Image: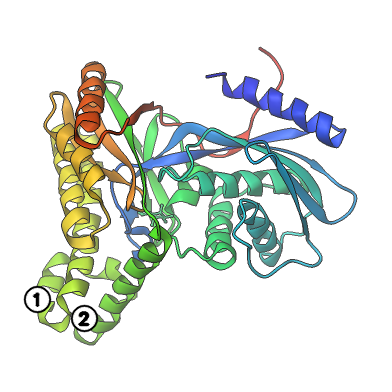
Amino acid sequence: MASMKAQARDLAQAFGLRFGRAAVVSRAPGRVNLIGEHTDYNDGFVMPAALDFATLVAAAPRADRRVRVYSQFMDETREFDLDAPQPAGDHAWSDYVFGVAAKLEEAGRRLAGADLAVWSDVPLGAGLSSSAALEVGAAHALLAASGLPFDPVEAAKVGQRAENEFVGMRCGIMDQYIAACGVAGNALLIDCRSLESRLVPIAPNLRLVITNSGVRHQHAGGEYNDRRTACEEGVRLLAPHLGPIAALRDVAPEALQRWRAALPDLIYRRCRHIVTENARVLEAETALKTGDFAACGAAMNASQTSMRDDFEITCPEIDFLADFAQGLDGVYGSRMTGGGFGGCTVSLVEADAVDPMKEALVAAYRDAYGLTAEVFVCQPSDGAGFVELGGV
Ligand code: GLA
């Protein structure tokens, strides 16, 4: 893999050929979530890390108020008029760029028109947040082209709004937040209510191993929104008993247990995943900070079980990969990562156990499903910023 700087230079060169001027290059990463799934839109806790896979956006301002964006992957250029913004997307890759442009303007950021060129090596549709990387990369690039400052948390909020209101996916803020605010060598414990975060260093002997099942279930967007609706229904039904609660964040596991009868079984199980998952994220944070990797792994394994049985967002291929990895030497824990219904698992692994783990997992998955699992070792990376093109 060419270095990010070499990729950025290539992109700036392609930009020059296409648009006839020099560009600056912004970068925003994909993410892996160690633990805390579907807790973000319940005002809860998550613990993702930014990946070394990233999206690059080359940008230069225009004299008018048009945004023109070229995707190297799609080999297509699309245009958007900042003075006549469409209210919603049209199910194209460019929605993530134009949605962010529209929401930045709505937030009071007066943008210049811009030409943009986009490149990415974040695997698409694998649950590693290629869309958030594009949103945050586009926000960084559009602000840079307009001579405006980049505020990471504001960019995360704008990206989420673009996805909620322009793309139509009711996601939480985790993916955009970590793409904007990630710190190399660390995961972040994010409080999705206060939008504050704490660094969680990844010890040098640990590796975050990502395994792509290659499975991408259809209708995942609809299922995702359904889960969110179920959580909201839980809050509505619990509120008469628990007083003014704004989100499942406000419900302790014991309180949920006490008022179980107030909820239909399905809603109860959805809520149980969220309230127990919030507790597991905090346990995992403490475990990583105190070097108790076995306890962190146990929380990850319990999260996998809860996603499988209570929230029902896994699938047989993912369950197989997580179960198999959990049984291997040097693997502390393994679980599905991301929105669900396919995608990837993340495993917490001793550095010297990674190679045998990879080999065993790929062979077992091929035997069981006839599929080849891709395995990546993640280097926790920085969030959005410029790529310096000069020097070696
Ligand atoms: C997707 C969403 C996030 C989060 C995860 C599940 O990645 O974009 O906001 O809800 O699913 O944890």
Residue type at mark 1 is: Arg
Query: x, y (%) of residue 187?
Result: 36, 38
Q: Circle 2 is placed at which residue position?
A: 242
Residue found at x 70% / y 23%: 9
Q: Residue furthest right?
A: 63
Residue 210, relative to residue 256: is it above or below? above
Quadrant observed for ligand 1 in the rendered image: bottom left
Q: Which residue is mark 1?
A: 258
Dot 2 amino acid type = Leu
Task: Measuring from the top left, give residue 333's x and y in whole percent.
Answer: 18, 36
Residue occupying image coordinates x 22% and y 80%: 238
Q: Is residue 291 above or below residue 286?
A: above
Q: Secondary structure at mark 2?
A: helix
**Any mark on residue 65, and which?**
none
Q: Quadrant of residue 228?
A: bottom left
Q: Position of residue 219 (x, y in %)?
A: 40, 61
